[in-house]
Image (cartoon, rainbow, N blue to C red):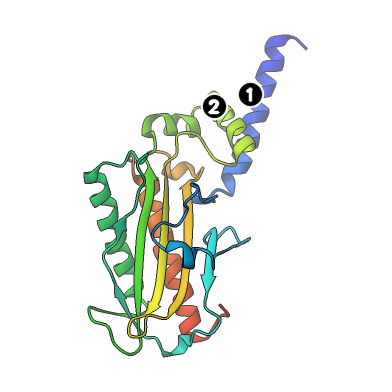
Amino acid sequence: MDGATDRRSWWVLAGLVLSTALAGCAVTQRAKVGGENYCPFLGNDVCGMLTATTDKKEADLRYVNPSARWSQYTKVLIEPVTFWGGDQSKLSPADQRTLTNFFYQTLTQQLAKKFQVVDQAGPGVMTIQVALEDATAATPGLRSISLVEPHARALATLKYLATGTFPFVGSAQAETKITDSVSGQLLAAAVSKRVGGGSPKDAAQWEWGDAENAITYWAQLMTTRLASWTSGTAAS
């Protein structure tokens, strides 16, 4: 077999590997939380309570109060989402507003499906506090090429196999704290980072599309978990 044939065979094999990987790819995927001070919003006390989770569908770090009486909660008070990026964040003030507003609106839309959204503290009300810690933009054109064009797709395979992430994707990292709106008792907290997945249907999107997909995922996950805990259908 000559060198040209070997190269063609390699590209075909790499393409098949990536196609197999893409078949099970989600729109976003969990990533390890970055930064030495990984929860500036939550603070050291709450941060020390967090433990790593093994379920890839969950937040990377999480705490759930074992004494919480979840069944008493039927309402949520959602505070405005804030941005807590460090000095190295490249997110402009305008993009910060765009993403935090999107985060708040998405949380409200999702949580309203299972809970009454209120604007005042009171009995049976959970306070939801969320901070967007950072976000990075995807590279739309190059990302599309990397998932569609055969040779570029093969190279994307190598990066995926080596690092567990695809090239040119965006990301978002956030923290959340859920408390009793009257007593302030901590009910749950989490820190999570998600990056763009390898789903071809989302290859072509605007630069903050991956960050928005991560935000939507978190809002849906929070709604599902809180609904299951307050209804008693799942253990915390």
* Left or right: 48 as drawn, with respect to 114: right
The quadrant in which the N terminus is found is top right
In the rendered image, the vertical position of residue 139 relative to residue 27, given as above or below: above
Q: Position of residue 188 (x, y in %)?
A: 47, 73
Residue 210 or 35: which is nearer the viewer?
35
Q: Position of residue 128 (x, y in %)?
A: 35, 72
In this view, the residue farthest toward the front is 44
Residue topped by disc 2: 150
Looking at the figure, which quarter contains the C terminus?
Answer: bottom right
Q: Position of residue 217 (x, y in %)?
A: 43, 59
Q: Nearer the viewer, residue 204 or 45?
A: 45
- Asked whether the beta carbons under mark 1 and mark 2 sit within 8 Å of each other, the answer is yes
Q: Quadrant of residue 234?
A: bottom right
Viewer-proximal residue among 203 and 9: 203
Q: In the rendered image, which residue does mark 1 sit on?
A: 11
Q: Where 91 falls versus 229 (above or below)?
A: above
Q: Residue 62 has which mark?
A: none
Judge the density around disc 2: few (<14), some (14-19), many (≥20) Cα neighbours within 10 Å.
some
Q: Is residue 9 above or below residue 216?
A: above
On screen, residue 165 versus residue 40, left or right, reads right
SS at badge 2: helix
Which of marks 2 and 1 precedes in the sequence? 1
Name the residue located 41 percent from the left edge and 69 percent from the top edge. Answer: 177
Residue 202 shows in the view? yes
Q: Which residue occupies 38% across, 30% down?
A: 141
Q: Amino acid at mark 2?
A: Pro
Q: Amino acid at mark 1?
A: Trp
Q: Nearer the viewer, residue 56 or 179?
A: 179
CA separation in Å, label 1 and label 2 = 8 Å
